[in-house]
Image: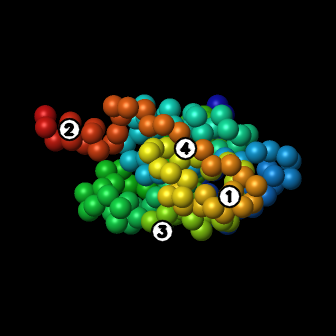
Amino acid sequence: MNRADLIPQKIIIAAQAAQVAAQWRVLGKKIVFTNGVFDILHQGHIFSLSQAAKEGDYLIVGLNADASVKRLKGESRPVNNQESRALVLASLLMVDAVVLFEEDTPLELIKAIMPDVLVKGGDYTVDQIAGAKEVMSNGGRVIINPILEGFSTTSIIEQMKSR
């Protein structure tokens, strides 16, 4: 994509995501879903998103809305608001769609999209991943990608505080 004016069009609502996923599926395309806060984008995020994108034809990223981030990470987060985080994610080449969700987990969004591949980064087990059971019972796969050591938003924030 070489037209920056198209970037905001990649930020869609859940109903649109389900519709777009259905259209891609009719074309025989494999849909990948991952999610996160993506507060201060860093090398670890790029690694994780790149690995997820390799698993299929289209990558949909579920993005925790601000209220969700505050509940999960505390009142001082997010550093960047949901509009800013969504726009940054949508500008990435490997991301095909960004969908905000208000809940603490993307379970309802995953059930609406029903991706072929669900990717989560970190030291989770499959039974800890929201939507894993639903995706697998629909014939999909769940992949846990390793975290790129030494890169985290929390450590970046701590470094900034200590300076």
Circle 2/circle 4 CB separation < 8 Å: no
Residue 135 sits above or below residue 155 on the image: below
Q: Earlier in the sequence, mark 2 or mark 4?
A: 4
Residue at the (80%, 45%) spot, across then down: 29
Q: Earlier in the sequence, mark 1 or mark 4?
A: 1
Q: Position of residue 112 (x, y in %)?
A: 68, 65
Query: Tag 4: residue type?
Result: Ile
Instruction: Identify the disc placed on residue 144.
Output: 4
Query: Tag 1: residue type?
Result: Val
Circle 3/circle 2 CB separation < 8 Å: no
Q: Secondary structure at mark 1?
A: helix
Q: CA distance from mark 1 to mark 3?
A: 19 Å
Residue that carries the numbered disc 3 in the rendered image: 103
Query: Tag 2: residue type?
Result: Met
Q: Residues within 10 Å of mark 1 (few under 14, many from 20)?
A: many
97 left or right, relative to 73: right
In-front residue for pair 143/163: 143
Say which of marks 2 and 4 sits in front.
Answer: 4
In-front residue for pair 92/74: 74
141 left or right, relative to 159: right
Q: CA distance from mark 2 to mark 1?
A: 39 Å
Q: Residues within 10 Å of mark 3 (few under 14, many from 20)?
A: some
Where residue 156 sits, quadrant-wise, is: top left
Say which of marks 3 and 4 sits in front.
Answer: 4
Q: Position of residue 96 (x, y in %)?
A: 65, 44
